[in-house]
Amino acid sequence: MKPERRDKDKNTSESPHVLTAEEAKKRATDSIEELQLAEEPGYGLLSDPNLEISAPLLTTDKPDRKSPIQTPQFYIVPFGIKNERTESGAPLVRLCILIDAYTGEFEEMTAFDKPVVYLTNQQAVNVVAAALNVAPAELRDAVVTLMFQSSEISHVRAYPFWRVTVKDRSYYVDQKGKLYGSLFRGRPGN
């Protein structure tokens, strides 16, 4: 994982407009050239002619924080190799670039040891529906948010999880489809 490159004191309320997914893709590809990211050890995939960009994922960063400024959001822009898919057709992701959703600035880059697959919001709802023993259609009013908060679920911003809120109860689903009934902050080193 490459260290973050962002201003921790940046006030996102100065730029309330959230980039579109296409703008995030462009900022990620521009960052590859501007910052010479393909030259970084372990990131040579970025110069592969078969490189493919999947749909960017808008992610909320620490959504429960109590702050007068706007909740930070970032895009995960996933990269893989053309035609590398799961049996169900989902793209395999080998690395991703995180882009600030308001400013378009490069935040960080992560390469995975093994390709990963990002769960869709519908897949997360299906996991919760199965646990509640209801049809997914019964959860059509659920509020579904892709989020990151350092916890026992994940310590890596490039590997967020879904929060599915049904009425007043929140459920959390990680990228492997594991369900969590609550969110506990992780201990350092876990």
Image (cartoon, rainbow, N blue to C red):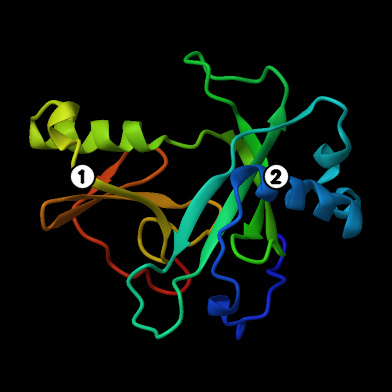
Relative to 96, residue 130 above or below: above
Q: Quadrant of the C terminus?
A: bottom left
Say what amino acid the circle numbered 2 marks. Answer: Lys
Left or right: 16 in relation to 95: left
Dividing the picture into quadrants, the one containing residue 130 is: top left
Dividing the picture into quadrants, the one containing residue 78 is: top right
Left or right: 121 in relation to 117: left
- Residue at the extreme top of the image, as rendered: 87
Tell me where residue 73 appears, x and y as whole percent: 51, 63
Q: Residue at x 70, y 44 (%)?
A: 25
| Residue holding disc 2 | 25
Distance between the alpha carbons at the discs numbered 2 and 1: 28 Å
Dot 1: element = loop
Relative to 71, residue 94 above or below: above
Q: Give the label on residue 70, or none.
A: none
Tell me where residue 170 appears, x and y as whole percent: 19, 55
Tell me where residue 107 appears, x and y as whole percent: 68, 64
Say what amino acid the circle numbered 1 marks. Answer: Ala
Q: Give the label on residue 142, or none.
A: 1
Dot 2: element = helix
Tell me where residue 40 appears, x and y as whole percent: 86, 54
